[in-house]
Image (tube, rainbow, N blue to C red):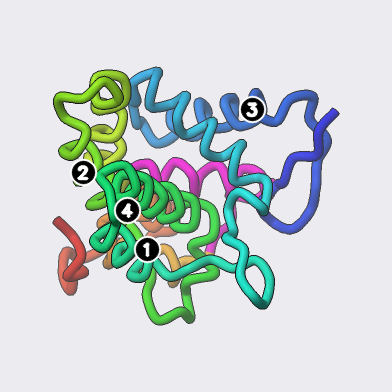
Amino acid sequence: MAPGRNFSGGLETVRNLEEFFRDSLDAAAAANRVTLDSQTMHYVVNLLTLFSRSESFYEPGPDGPRLRPLALMLADAMDAASEEERNFALQRIGDVALFVAGLFADSLRRAAVDVDYYVYMGGGAYQSLAGSLRGTLRGRLFGEVFTELSAKFALLVDVLQEMRAASRGSSHEDALRLYELWVKTGSPRAERLLRAYGIQPLSQARSRYQH
């Protein structure tokens, strides 16, 4: 059996980590009424499985593994020596942004940038990647996946946050944080939970990163 993270610091034993993520993602998507193409679902499951290994998520550095800021990753993409390197950097931005915003949004609460920035950067990276791959063999294979990841990025963040909440075994979430997420991203999940708490969100002060 493989150890699977429950996103709250503990571990639970599962027979197959990929199967665990697929079942969890299916349940969370259904709870949030988000539909995804089967190839996109498969991509996200593979991403979660890959990033469950720290050596795949973090990058090596002189002081040990680290996670580079998205802005520096974007600079890498813009300065890439080849189209292949640029596309790799764009995919890395999208993947990291989705993983962090979806599963570790609470860690951004006191950071310089919050979830809305990750949604903006990640969705934009996937969109640029889909455009760059148009007309290529890889584009025929994955172009629609990256297009859907871009179009539904914020909804996927909701789905992953639902996964994390379910793994913690508690339906209680910080109402203030939910309101912050709703204001910054327009999250349907945050709005639904706020209404369940008896809080009526008002459509004001929306994030500049919203499309």
> For residue 122, which numbered disc appears in the image?
4
Frontmost of labels 1 and 2 is 1
Magenta stretch, overall SS: helix
Q: Position of residue 52 (x, y in %)?
A: 65, 45
How far is the residue under mark 4 from the one under mark 3?
Answer: 23 Å
Amino acid type of the residue tagged 1 in the rendering = Met
Crowdedness near tag 4: few (<14), some (14–19) or many (≥20) residues, C-alpha within 10 Å: many
Q: Is residue 44 magenta?
A: no
Q: Of the residues under marks 4 and 1, which one precedes in the sequence? A: 1
Label 1: few (<14), some or many (≥20) within 10 Å?
A: some
Looking at the image, is mark 2 or mark 4 earlier in the sequence? 4
Residue at x 25%, y 42% (from the top left corner): 129
- Where residue 127 is drawn, which disc sits there? 2
Question: Which residue is tagged 1?
Answer: 73
Span highlighted in magenta in the image: 155-173
> Does any portion of residue 188 appear in the rendered image?
no
Eye-nearest disc, 2 or 3: 2
Image location (x, y in percent) of residue 7: 66, 52
In the picture of the structure, the residue carrying the numbered disc 3 is 18
Residue type indicated by callout 4 = Gly
